[in-house]
Image: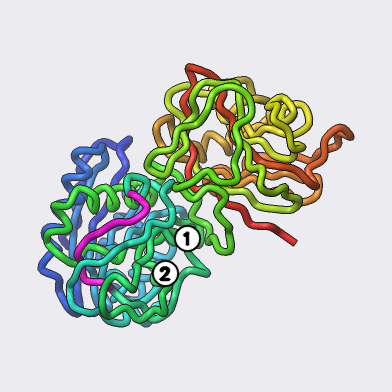
């Protein structure tokens, strides 16, 4: 057996690229393998490559943080190898599927769930517009709201949206041959049976693997799958944008400072103030937003406060979900500021470092407030203060001070029964 050779020190993340084919073979596979090796060399993770399915055994799989299926096709693993790979995923392993990884193992239900959707067919290679739905994920945070590129655009046998977290979707009006009735996911991620899964339908052409934007997309998916970067990959449906990246209509600045708007992103300037959504108050809801802090910056998200042009009204009559990873436990990232610390161990495991995007879900039901950081529950708080109430109030984001730079994207809400 030609097993891959260990490539680096144990402390590095380790990735296995698997490119066996039992059907159509893409001539871009060597380019894809070389690209992942180059990404590893440039970003501090070890990469081994093989087409030998016998490495799907705990003796070898357990060396790796993620396995990349690089345009595999057909039945590439036998029953025992499938069983070992299932165990690997269930024990926390990562999976990355590239392009025809969805044209693989049609008779293996576990794999069908892991990849998210099976290939149905495709039109001719042509340009198309990709709509980027999640600009906080490491695989898509470098992109704009849309992405123009040329590839072979897969149609899938079923729409995976209800089971996965869609990162990007095709605009079927921008090309010919789409068959998914206008809702056409093309890249997604998910937490799957204990492991992490990322799939991209891109990558048919050799040119893809010399394209910086695609390489950054692939790198982000690998970093998520290995656990080097965290993301909220739970399915997300039914949310309404409060800030969609183009306009602050419905929002109002209270107090000093402001926010700049560029590249679909609000960035804090000066303070101590707050930009609040005055168009509507909320009772029972899930508020989601993506945020990024520069260095040791301070900010927060306010909920449950009365309408006011005084930012201190939000401090004194609402609750702040803090953003500041180095402050005291009751006023650090994930804390309900000055009331309840986050679960620090859970917070540390979920938090991305300064300069990288994070996602908050702030879920309010009655007087109960839960905080999820990149999909992980880090705080579960119940209001008992008669001066405050979470059952009806407004939401806002803080601009803390001259030395604090925190950015926000994709603020959206789902009202709950």
Q: Residue at x 69, y 39 (%)?
A: 303
The residues tagged by marks 2 and 1 sit, at their Cα atoms, a distance apart of 10 Å
Q: Residue at x 46, y 26 (%)?
A: 405
Q: Residue furthest right?
A: 386
Q: Nearer the viewer, mark 2 or mark 1?
A: 1
Q: Which numbered dot is residue 224?
A: none
**Relative depth, front residue between 66 and 320:** 320
Check disc 2 and report the residue beneath it: 116
Question: Compared to 375, does 1 lie above or below?
Answer: below
Residue 88 visible in rendering? no
Residue range corresponding to the magenta coloring: 144-153
Closest to the observer, 164 or 36: 164
Mark 2 Cα-neighbour bin, 10 Å: few <14, some 14–19, many ≥20: many
Residue 107 screen position, x and y as percent: 37, 82
Mark 1, residue position: 165
Q: Give me the residue at 80% from left, 49% from top.
A: 366
Q: State the image coordinates of residue 388 (x, y, percent, origin top left).
A: 82, 35
């Amino acid at each position: 057996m030609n097993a891959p050779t260990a490539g680096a020190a144990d402390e590095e993340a380790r990735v296995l690229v698997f490119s066996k084919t039992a059907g159509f073979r893409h001539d871009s596979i060597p380019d894809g393998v070389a690209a992942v090796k180059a990404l590893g060399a440039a970003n501090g993770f070890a990469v081994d490559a093989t087409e030998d399915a016998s490495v799907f055994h705990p003796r070898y799989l357990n060396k790796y943080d993620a396995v990349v299926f690089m345009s595999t096709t057909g039945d590439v693993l036998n029953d025992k190898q499938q069983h070992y790979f299932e165990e690997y995923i269930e024990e926390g392993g990562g999976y990355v599927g590239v392009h025809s990884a969805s044209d693989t193992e049609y008779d293996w239900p576990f794999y069908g769930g892991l990849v998210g959707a099976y290939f149905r067919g495709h039109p001719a290679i042509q340009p198309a517009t990709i709509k980027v739905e999640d600009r906080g994920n490491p695989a898509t945070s470098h992109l704009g709201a849309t992405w123009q590129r040329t590839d072979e655009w897969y149609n899938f046998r079923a729409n995976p949206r209800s089971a996965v977290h869609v990162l990007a979707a095709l605009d079927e009006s921008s090309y010919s041959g789409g068959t998914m009735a206008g809702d056409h996911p093309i890249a997604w991620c998910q937490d799957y049976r204990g492991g992490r899964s990322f799939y991209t339908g891109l990558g048919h052409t050799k040119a893809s693997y010399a394209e910086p934007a695609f390489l950054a997309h692939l790198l982000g998916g690998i970093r998520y799958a290995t656990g080097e970067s965290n993301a909220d990959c739970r399915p997300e449906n039914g949310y309404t944008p409060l800030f969609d990246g183009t306009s602050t209509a419905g929002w109002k600045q209270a107090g000093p400072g402001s926010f700049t708007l560029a590249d679909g992103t609000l960035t804090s300037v000066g303070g101590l103030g707050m930009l609040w959504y005055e168009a509507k108050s909320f009772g029972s809801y899930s508020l989601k937003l993506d945020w990024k802090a520069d260095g040791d910056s301070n900010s927060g998200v306010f909920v449950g406060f009365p309408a006011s042009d005084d930012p201190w009204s939000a401090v004194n009559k609402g609750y702040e979900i803090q953003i500041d990873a180095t402050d005291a436990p009751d006023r650090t990232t994930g804390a309900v500021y000055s009331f309840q610390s986050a679960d620090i161990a859970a917070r540390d495991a979920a938090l991305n470092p300064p300069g990288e995007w994070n996602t908050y879900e702030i879920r309010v039901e009655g007087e109960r407030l839960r905080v999820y950081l990149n999909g992980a529950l880090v705080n579960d708080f119940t209001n008992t203060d008669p001066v405050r109430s979470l059952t009806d109030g407004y939401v806002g984001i803080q601009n803390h001070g001259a030395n604090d730079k925190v950015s926000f994207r994709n603020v959206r809400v789902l009202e709950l029964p």
